[in-house]
Image: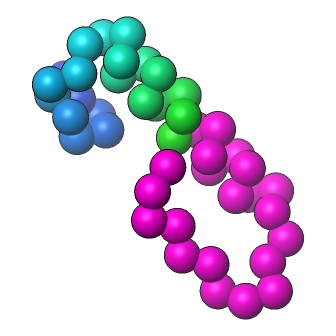
Amino acid sequence: MTAPTGNPDLSLDEEKMLRRKITETALKLLTTEVAEQLVVMKY
């Protein structure tokens, strides 16, 4: 699998930056307290 995030058009560096952004967003969401359902559509 060459593009785990689903964009084979990205260069290796761009793919790494995208993966990092996704990971940072996930970590932020895991530490965010929510009172009701939260839907995240974009990272």
Q: Residue furthest bottom?
A: 36
Is residue 16 toward the left or the right of residue 35 in the image? left
Taking the spot 82% from the left edge, 56% from the top edge, the residue there is 31
Q: Is residue 33 left or right of residue 37?
A: right
- Locate residue 14: give its quadrant: top left
Q: Is residue 27 visible?
A: yes
Compared across the picture, whether 37 is left or right of 20 comes to right
Question: Image point 35% across, 22% down: which residue?
Answer: 15
Highlighted range, magenta: 23-43
In this view, which residue lies farthest toward the front? 42
Q: Position of residue 17 (x, y in %)?
A: 47, 22
Whole-percent x, y for residue 20 in the image: 54, 28
From what the image shows, is residue 7 above or below residue 9?
below
Task: Report if residue 42 lies within the magenta region.
Answer: yes
* On-image quarter of the N terminus: top left
Colour scheme of the picture:
rainbow
Q: Residue at x 70, y 58 (%)?
A: 29
Q: Residue furthest left?
A: 9
Residue in the image at 54% along x and 75% along y: 39
Q: Quadrant of residue 6?
A: top left
Depicted 10 relative to depicted 11: above or below: below
Residue 36 lies, in percent from the top left, at 73, 89
Magenta region's main secondary structure?
Answer: loop
Whether 16 is among the magenta residues is no
- Regarding residue 1, the answer to whether it shows in the image is no
